[in-house]
Amino acid sequence: MISFNVPPYVGTEEQYIHEAILAQKICGDGAFTRKCSKWMEERFSAKKVLLTTSGTAALDMALLMCDLKPGDEVILPSYTFSSTANCAVLAGAKLVFVDIRPDTMNIDEAKIEAAITERTKVIIVVHYAGVACEMDTIMRIARKHNLKVVEDAAQGVMAKYKSLYLGTIGDFGCYSFHETKNYSMGEGGAILINDEAYIEKAEILREKGTNRSKFFRGQVDKYTWVDFGDSYLPSELNAAYLWAQLEVADKINEDRLNSWEFYYNSLKPLADAGKIELPAVPNACVHNAHMFYIKCRNLKERTEFLSYMKAQGIFSVFHYIPLHSAPAGLKFGRFSGEDQNTTAESERIARLPMYYGMTEEEINRVICAVKTYFTNHGYRREI
Ligand SMILES: Cc1ncc(COP(=O)(O)O)c(C=O)c1O
């Protein structure tokens, strides 16, 4: 059986968790949390990085800091995980879904301006599969209309747009360290604060509305409740697990990129023959091999393909059901313009197994099964 995902594990996790226990500091913001934040601030040239309990929590924090009023609108793609939308709902906003580009499955930057109204306050972009959105254009539109930009870089840790790491380009960046992500702490995430003016606000929001972070730095002699807040800081035990992986972040990245390239090169002949489509990575993007997907011809072919893979003992999966057509999407939002690509392209995606440490033999088994299916069963596309 080949799993779809295996949580990343590098071997030093237990030692670091044990160290956290011995240090008698297992709540948040201890030595391991500080190591992780500092490492990300230095590596990604980020002004401030705060670990959070999840990518969802990082998004919630980002939107709560955007100071939205009832009736304000947030632009986002419909092809994404529910957390991208929940944060805007939590902040009291109406959702305006914008179509995606069929090549990268990212928000179509050319369709954003048509979705802007006088109520629009924020654009949330999602760097799907760790491949960046067209950020120069998006930032130009945002600055022109005085909008904040939140990067949902849950899948984009270590990936770049031009020379910039994802998460550091908009006003706020959000990472996920869920067990399905390239680097993990079980459940966890991080918020990147790229505008210094928001650092103190973020610390207070994350620490139950108190100025405890300032107190720990010796900047105030007692801490108190200063504003609205919640509890978004993860335990040191989780941070210790993450630290083990950040220490070898490049090794993990290279391993995944090698697997991705192996898939890509082996399946290229099928794509050249018009049987499948492969992921596109625009020139401006350095991706992180978060996932490897193929595109089938349509929903029927994808359903058959996934059952075929399962019968071969290989777990391949699909996602997302577009949010705008889901019950909560209908309740909280509307689609701007015509859904030309979101639904049609979402029905074609099949994700192949991808995880750190996947062996050549395992990848070969997946490749053989894909080739066999599309040679013997798949529909022949007109080319
Ligand atoms: C695009 C996207 N946004 C947000 C999230 C939420 O992250 P988490 O599971 O850490 O809350 C995920 C993770 O599944 C994601 O893929």
Image (cartoon, helix red, strand yellow):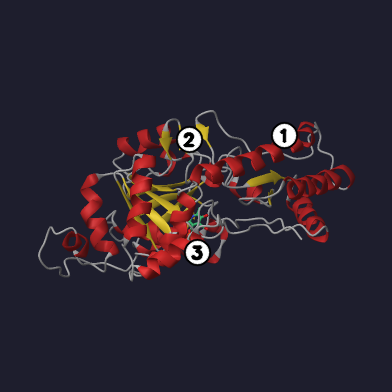
Q: Residue 265 carries which label?
A: 1
Please provide percent x and percent y for residue 38.
Answer: 33, 48
Which amino acid type is marked by label 1?
Asn
Q: What residue type is labelled 2?
A: Ala
Q: What element carries label 3?
A: helix
Q: Is the residue marked 1 within 8 Å of ligand 1, measured from its CB?
A: no
Q: How far apart are marks 2 and 3 (CA)?
A: 48 Å
Residue at (34, 45) in percent of width and height: 41
Indicate whether 181 appears above or below 45: below
Amino acid type at image mark 3 = Glu
Residue 301 relative to residue 240: left or right: right
- Examine the rendered structure and indicate whether residue 356 appears above or below residue 282: below
| Mark 3, residue position | 14
Q: In which quarter of the image is residue 92?
A: bottom left
Residue behind mark 2: 110
First reached walking from the N terminus: tag 2 or tag 1: 2
x then y, percent, for residue 383? 80, 31
